[in-house]
Image (cartoon, rainbow, N blue to C red):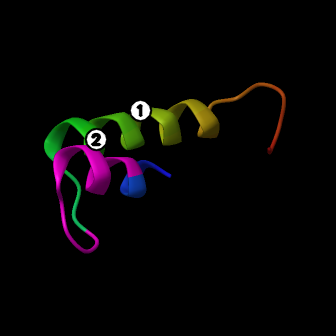
């Protein structure tokens, strides 16, 4: 979903993300990996 958002709002192409969206995706992955409630 982040890739679709980045493409639509920031105009990125292909598999690349802008720096802001890439940072957001990494933050979300870290939060998911550290979740105390187990796997989602």
Q: In terms of secondary structure, where does tag 2 sit? A: helix
Stretch of the chain drawn in magenta: 5-15
Q: Quadrant of the C terminus?
A: top right
Secondary structure under tag 1 reads helix
Q: CA distance from mark 1 to mark 2?
A: 10 Å
Q: Is residue 14 above or below residue 26?
A: below
**Foreground pick, 9 / 30:** 9
Q: Residue 19: which quarter of the image?
A: top left
**Disc 1 to disc 2: CB gap under 8 Å:** no
Residue 16 placement, left or right of 32? left
Q: Quadrant of residue 13?
A: bottom left
Residue 12 among magenta residues: yes
Identify the mark at residue 38; answer none if there is no mark. none
Between discs 1 and 2, the one toward the N terminus = 2
In magenta stretch: residue 21: no
Within 10 Å of the Cα at label 2, are there few (<14), some (14-19), or many (20+) other Cα atoms? some
Residue, far front: 8
Report the mark closest to the observer, 1 or 2: 2
Q: Label 2: which residue?
A: 21
Going 38% across and 47% down the picture, which residue do you hit? Answer: 5
Residue at 25% over, 74% down: 14
Which of the numbered marks, if any, corresponds to residue 27? 1
Q: Position of residue 26 (x, y in %)?
A: 38, 41
Q: Nearer the viewer, residue 17 or 29?
A: 17
Numbered marks: total? 2
Left or right: residue 38 versus residue 10 is right
The residue most toward the top is 36
Residue 15 at x, y = what percent? 28, 71
Which residue does the image show at 70% across and 29% down from the upper left? 35
Picture coordinates of residue 1, whole percent (x, y):
50, 52
In the rendered image, the residue lying farthest to the bottom is 14
């Amino acid at each position: 979903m982040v890739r679709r958002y980045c493409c639509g709002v920031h105009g990125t192409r292909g598999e690349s993300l802008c720096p802001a969206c890439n940072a957001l995706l990494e933050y979300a992955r870290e939060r998911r990996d550290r979740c105390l409630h187990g796997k989602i």
